[in-house]
Amino acid sequence: MAFSISFYSPSILMSSVKVFKRSLSTTRMLANKQMTVRDALNSAMDEEMERDERVYILGEEVALYDGAYKVSRGLYKKYGESRVIDTPITEIGFAGIAVGSAMAGLRPICEFMTFNFSMQAIDQVINSAAKTFYMSAGRVNVPIVFRGPNGAASGVAAQHSQCFGAWYSQCPGLKVISPYNSEDAKGLLKAAIRDPDPVVFLENELLYGNQYPITDEVLDKDFVLPIGKAKIERKGDHITLVAHSKGVELALDAAKELSAIGIEAEVINLRSLRPLDINTIIQSVVKTNHIISVEQGWPYAGIGSEISAQIMESEAFYHLDAPVIRVTGADVPMPYTKSLEIAALPQPNDIVETAKKILGV
Amino acid sequence: MMYSKITVRRLIDLKFLKKYYKFSSTMPVNVDKSIYPGIKKIDYTSKLNIDEPPMNTVPIFRILKNNGEITNNCNSIIIPENNELLKMYKSMVLLSIMDKLLYESQRQGRISFYMTNEGEEAIQIGSAAGLNFNDMVYGQYRESGILLYRGFTPEQFMNQCFGNIDDIGKGRQMPVHYGSKNLNFVTISSPLTTQLPQAVGTAFSFKQLKNNRCTIVYFGEGAASEGDAHAAFNFASTLDCPIIFFCRNNGYAISTPAHEQYRGDGIVSHGSGYGIATIRVDGNDIIAVYNAILKAREYVMNNTRPLILEAMTYRLGHHSTSDDSTAYRSKDEIKNWSNESPIKRLKQFLKTKDLWNDQLDSEYTKETKKQLMQTFTIASKKNKPNWKEMFNDVYYEIPEHLLTQMNSLEDHLSKYSDHYPKDCGV
């Protein structure tokens, strides 16, 4: 991994860790404890496998190869072939194995090499994992974590760059988590593994290698985050930016730019898409009277659409001074060429311009 | 999806690839076996041949002839005890009477849907009798007899079909989608063949948990065309799972005849491709099915391996109440097969053993019809499940938004209860 060159003095660094953490993600200058998202996910699985022997991992390339993105690194060596299982290449096959083994008492972590490939298995996820508890009248629960990278990576075009947040969030019976940084990744993955319901855990490939500061509390093996609670990443009074996953980073970058012109944005990291922490959003809107949703996925029936609708149906509607605006990916399959890819994804500047527009500045 | 995976692979750090290839190159090179990771043994040839698939047909294991006599040269077979034989016969008869009753009730518009088991009773009852009670059963939808044999009562079947207050499924599922955790029978799932990979997953769990249980999963020859079936065969084989894949090859997938479903020798022919052992049995011969299951169970448990069991039979009834099978098969064909009825065959066998006669038969039939009619009437008049059940069991703990809706509906119903039916807990 390359070391990025820093132009900031150490004193600025220490006081602005939160805002600058991404650009400094691979420097070793900070004395604070840092952890990559990849390591956070890895340690979450490791700790939960240690804690509960019913937990096992299955998927393509997860064992000997340590996972296509190395998220399961070292776990095969530590837990052996009965708990870290390489499967033949059939998503519907191993997703079905996961469902059946969860019904029978194990707690599978089912890795999709990317969520784009989960489409081949979506019948098992939606029709079986999500609905079995209801259909069995509460007798058979299906505790599975379906996890893997989701959303746009870099230069991998239409069939590797789709956000499935809205797809899976639409289905009752599923919980859908979309973590942003290492703290989210660790605390939420552990919560997902312990959860009695099926959980879709949407990681982001571009964030895997990013380092984020973490506290000792996060390192503790009993650290779990509640599913369904958003986190205010940055406080502000003028406008609310609500986002998930990579979108949080864009929102934080935009908030920094807005701050330079005197606009203080409040950035909400959703963490969980279903259940959605609408109360935190409402409270923020009551304070700021303005809101923009930010996501890399498509606009049509997206997460921003849901947030917008829920605001309309809530008390927050009466506190809005301007309409809710969605900043999303373009409504096209992801193009390959770099210039087009950039144009198809929301950029911090899009958020800044939208914020200025609805604030009338 | 291989193409896409190659694209992803390309993105992976070269460092990791080096490690991967290092691993590959240290694979044991054993000329006695094979230098190719993909095959077990090498045999080179200088002849360029196209190998046609084998033309032979795997024989069908049969014990009972149509007249109820045991076939000559039947060695080391197990005939169930007399009381078990009678239980098997009575279960088959009860199942067929219940089928007629519920089929008619759908025709009268009293339930929305039904699927009969006619012609396949021996498969269900014979296999249920041969399994251990704690072996997990995944059915497709035509396996009611297994539940019946394990103790699911006619009352429970009818409660489910009416979706009434005593339905253990709380009125959630459409008719015939039975399930019973106590009887180790997984709730029926409508999308075809999803049960196969799941059953393999359950068998995998049993292996991990070392609890001396196996899984049996039922499916039709049509379902075997779904990708799920092939995924399941391959996974069961590569993961060494103790599972019996029980194919009911009943000639038709709704209207599609079996010969349009595949070109090989039925479903057993998949066995060699996936490295799975097979048995082919006469599905209308309950003693043969019973023996095949005993043997299959012993095999999967002793070897911790899967087995494909193909039972040849004929679906005498329509596919479901949404189907009229005379549109695609002749009445003569159906009539000929009704002479092969598995119930008739077992009855003949019981007669040869002096365990049963025509008088006992008509008495039992009459009494069963009477009792089932009473049960039916009671089930049809029962209240519907409490409306609150609509909100329960979506998640392990009821989420706030559903709780809010439930409370709001409760307020509404308490204000306007006069406008709602009284049979759903209002």
Image (cartoon, coloured by chain):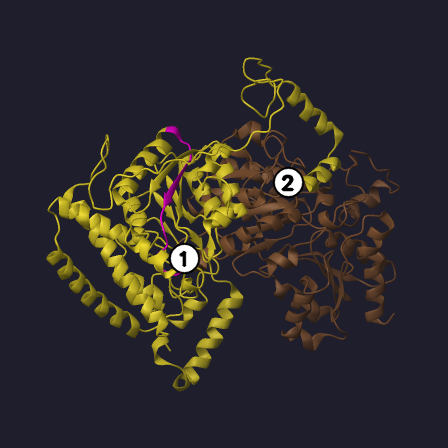
Chain colours: A brown, B yellow
Chain letter of the residue carrying label 2 = A
Q: In front here: A108 or B48?
A: B48
Asked if residue B318 is among those painted magenta in the image, a careful observer would answer yes
Query: Which residue does the image show at 63% across and 74% down from the upper left?
Result: A313
Give the residue number, with chain letter if any, for mark 1: A136
Q: Looking at numbered disc 2 in the image, what kind of residue is underneath it?
A: Ala
Does residue B163 appear left or right of residue B191 in this picture?
left
User: For numbered disc 1, what is the local secondary structure?
Assistant: loop
How many other residues sit within 10 Å of disc 2, few (<14), some (14-19) or many (≥20)? Answer: many
- Percent x, y of residue B78: 22, 35
User: For numbered disc 2, what is the local secondary structure?
Assistant: helix
From what the image shows, is residue A263 above or below residue B198? below
Quadrant housing the N terminus of chain A? top right
- Is disc 2 on the same chain as disc 1? yes
Does residue B401 appear left or right of residue B101 in this picture?
right
Q: Magenta residues, as a range?
A: B303-319
* Residue A40, disc: 2
Q: Looking at numbered disc 1 in the image, what kind of residue is underneath it?
A: Ser
